[in-house]
Image (tube, grey):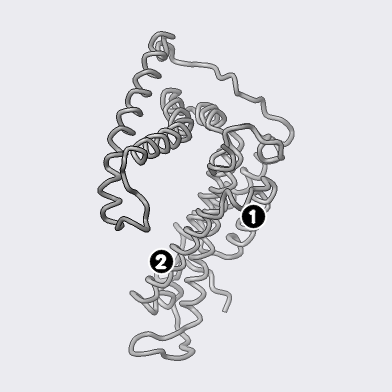
């Protein structure tokens, strides 16, 4: 299961994985908040480096994350290219001045401001991806449910999130079983023999029984929870809850530092920024 899914279903043995769910959630939220609001590489580069360290500490298997990594990198490079094609001087408008290096054709010019701005955007996107990746690789559905509950999210929502993530392997297994059984009955899905559109049309025959089996599973789980009087209390406890350790306290200190930087940046750069000043820090 660990080799097939990016989501972790068993507690890990590395430092980040041993933290409790609340600490991981706080660390993710503080990192993403700082990354999303900031256009200053003096903040983004240390944050990116910190999240890279977190990801390396999890020791992910390349086969496990290769597909999603290639997809994210390709899509965001393509997105940056489209941004340049739509607005070749987007960096000039964001930074406030222009130094044209050379012209390609027509309105398409290359300026250091635009290259710098697009690089900052790319750094922000990759930083958010790295932060999300180490979080997904280090937390289990049970820990996520506990972490959300400790942050005062209603426990019914926590249960829905946890059960939804736990159901992914079952849905995937059911899909393979239905697909194999239909192929044994003559359904052709080989890409060498059938066109893409025909395969998509025939995939509907897999989707319908998959949905029915999923709804049946949901009904069974809901009935079991009703029989155990789930939801009658305002609070609940969790078997997977872990008390904060010294490591948790250390990482929560990092959270506090990130939130302080976030608050200072929000006040100084966002709210008190002079009219007409660019939001991107440009060293030149």
Q: Is residue 9 left or right of residue 175?
A: right
175 or 18, which lies in front?
175
Residue 102 locus on image (x, y percent): 46, 91
Q: Quadrant of residue 276?
A: bottom left
Decide: few, some or many residues near mark 1? Use Cα within 10 Å; few <14, some 14-19, many ≥20. some
Q: Is residue 3 left or right of residue 58?
A: left
Q: Residue at x 50, y 62 (%)?
A: 73
Residue 253 locus on image (x, y percent): 67, 41
257 or 18, which lies in front?
18
Q: Which mark is residue 79?
A: 2
Task: Decide: is 122 above or below 238.
Answer: below
Check the image and name the residue furthest to the right: 246
Q: Residue at x 47, y 64 (%)?
A: 74
- The local secondary structure at tag 2 comes to helix
Q: Quadrant of the N terminus?
A: top right
Q: Which residue is mark 1?
A: 52
């Amino acid at each position: 299961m660990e080799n097939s899914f990016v989501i972790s279903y068993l507690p890990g043995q590395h430092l980040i994985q041993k933290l409790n769910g609340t600490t991981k959630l706080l660390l993710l939220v503080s990192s993403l908040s700082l990354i999303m609001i900031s256009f200053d590489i003096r903040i983004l580069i240390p944050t990116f480096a910190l999240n890279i360290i977190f990801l390396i500490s999890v020791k992910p298997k390349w086969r496990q994350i290769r597909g999603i990594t290639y997809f994210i990198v390709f899509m965001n490079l393509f997105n940056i290219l489209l941004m340049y094609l739509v607005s070749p001087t987007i960096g000039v408008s964001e930074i406030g001045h222009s130094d044209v290096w050379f012209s390609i054709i027509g309105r398409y010019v290359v300026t250091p401001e635009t290259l710098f701005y697009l690089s900052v955007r790319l750094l922000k996107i990759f930083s958010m991806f790295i932060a999300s990746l180490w979080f997904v690789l280090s937390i289990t559905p049970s820990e996520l449910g506990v972490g959300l509950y400790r942050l005062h999210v209603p426990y019914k929502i926590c249960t829905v999130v946890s059960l939804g993530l736990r159901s992914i392997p079952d849905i995937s297994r059911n899909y393979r079983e239905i697909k194999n059984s239909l192929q044994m009955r003559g359904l052709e899905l080989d890409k060498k023999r059938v066109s893409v559109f025909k395969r998509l049309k025939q995939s509907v025959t897999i989707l319908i029984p998959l949905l029915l089996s999923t709804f049946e599973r949901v009904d069974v789980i809901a009935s079991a929870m009703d029989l155990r009087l789930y939801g009658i209390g305002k609070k609940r406890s969790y078997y997977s809850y872990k008390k904060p350790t010294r490591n948790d306290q250390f990482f929560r200190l990092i959270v506090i530092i990130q939130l302080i930087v976030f608050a200072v940046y929000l006040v100084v750069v966002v709210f008190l920024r002079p009219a007409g000043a660019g939001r991107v820090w440009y060293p030149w």
